[in-house]
Image (cartoon, grey):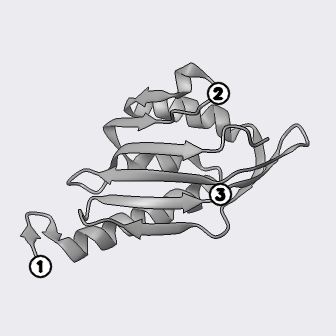
Amino acid sequence: MQKSATGTDEEIRARNHDALTRYFRLLEALDIDAWIELWAPDCEVSAPYAAESAARALYGREDLHRHYAAEAAKYVRLRYPATEIQPLLDPGRFLARWFPHGDLADGGSYRNENVGIFEFDATGRISRFVEYFNPTSP
């Protein structure tokens, strides 16, 4: 068991797992103002299959907040059933798999399956996230 300035690997892993649990809970609540606090100020998000080129790479909390607030406004309800959060060897990295189910404000619905790698900084904030999803899902 390794010990660092911020705790043992197990303590760091548990803290980061809790942050990811909050991540999905806050997205379900469409509470982007609270959700953005989980992110490091200099965070990076990469979504290679994003429809809009501007959304394929986001840098910093301000850009991330602006983008996700606009996305959240498209939904009246969002759920993440059967979310899987898997720790990796490094306690600061996780693999997650989730299946968003959303009811859209325009009356439509959204379903997809996603997988991503989350990386945390030493303070327990998300510093980097790479997301893959099915780009052909409605």
Q: CA distance from mark 1 to mark 2?
A: 43 Å
Whichever of labels 3 and 1 marks the residue nearer the N terminus, that label is: 1
Q: Name the residue rendered at 23%, 76% in the picture.
A: 10
Q: Nearer the viewer, residue 103 or 116?
A: 116
Which disc is residue 77 wearing? none
Q: Mark 1: give few (<14), some (14-19) or many (20+) Cα within 10 Å.
A: few
Circle 1 residue = 1
- What percent of the width, then of the height, locates residue 107? 91, 42
Q: Mark 3: give few (<14), some (14-19) or many (20+) Cα within 10 Å.
A: some
Give the number of the mark in front: 3 or 2. 2
Whichever of labels 1 and 2 marks the residue nearer the N terminus, that label is: 1
* 105 vs 112: above or below: above
Which disc is residue 51 wearing? 2
Instruction: Give the structural element (helix, strand or loop) at label 1.
Output: loop
* 129 vs 69: above or below: below
Q: Name the residue rendered at 51%, 36% in the picture.
A: 47
* 6 vs 138: above or below: below
Q: CA distance from mark 3 to mark 1?
A: 35 Å
Instruction: Give the structural element (helix, strand or loop) at label 3.
Output: helix
Amino acid at pointer 3? Glu
**Which quadrant does the N terminus fall into?**
bottom left
Q: Mark 2: give few (<14), some (14-19) or many (20+) Cα within 10 Å.
A: few
Which disc is residue 28 wearing? 3
- What percent of the width, then of the height, locates residue 4? 8, 66
